Amino acid sequence: MLFVLATSILIASAEPQSAAPPEKDAWIGCLTDYAQAESAGTKTPVTITIEALAACRPERAAYWQSLVKRGVDRQVAGDTIAGEEREAARTLITFIAHAR
């Protein structure tokens, strides 16, 4: 149940699925899985979000590399992911707080 809710929240805040590269889906999936697993514990939503972002760093890097390989400028790719990371963090914090 939590996984479905978290996934739908993150997907709704992201670009349409058909336009998202599979690396982005893997990154968002990692964040969602981590938040779901940790939300039953006693950590704060912010702590869980920070840990999720750190744990999913390889998926984030793969997403950045996929954008660069598709011809996106390195700086633009970095800025794009940074914005998406901020939005994902806000979404995860809200999701975890509401799930409890």
Image (tube, helix red, strand yellow):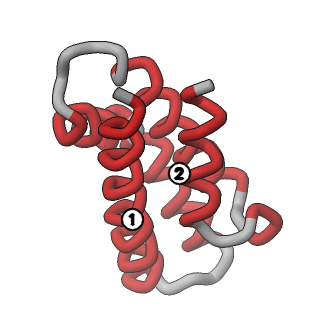
Q: Which amino acid does label 1 sit on?
A: Glu
Q: Where is residue 87 in the image (x, y as percent from the top left)?
A: 39, 65
| Mark 1 → mark 2, Cα distance in angstroms | 19 Å
Q: Which residue is drawn at 37% across and 39% down?
A: 98
Say which of 12 and 66 sits in front: 12
Looking at the image, tell me whether mark 1 or mark 2 is earlier in sequence order.
Answer: 2
The residue pinned by badge 2 equals 62
- Residue that numbered label 1 is attached to: 87
Q: Where is residue 34 in the image (x, y as percent from the top left)?
A: 43, 27
The residue drawn where x is 34% and y is 32% is 55
**Quarter residue 16 falls in:** bottom right
- The disc labelled 2 sits on which kind of residue? Ala
Question: Residue drawn at (33%, 54%), measured in percent from left and top?
Answer: 89
The relative height of residue 70 versus residue 10 in the rendered view (above or below) is: below
Instruction: Name the residue rendered at 26%, 32% in the picture.
Output: 48
Left or right of 74 on screen, residue 71 = right
Q: Provide the secondary structure element on which disc 2 rests.
A: helix
Label disc, if present, on residue 35 of the rendered structure: none
Q: Residues within 10 Å of mark 1 (few under 14, many from 20)?
A: some
Task: State which quarter of the image contains the C terminus.
Answer: top left
Q: Nearer the viewer, mark 1 or mark 2?
A: 1
Tell me if 55 is positioned left or right of 45 in this view.
right
Q: Is residue 13 above or below residue 46?
A: below
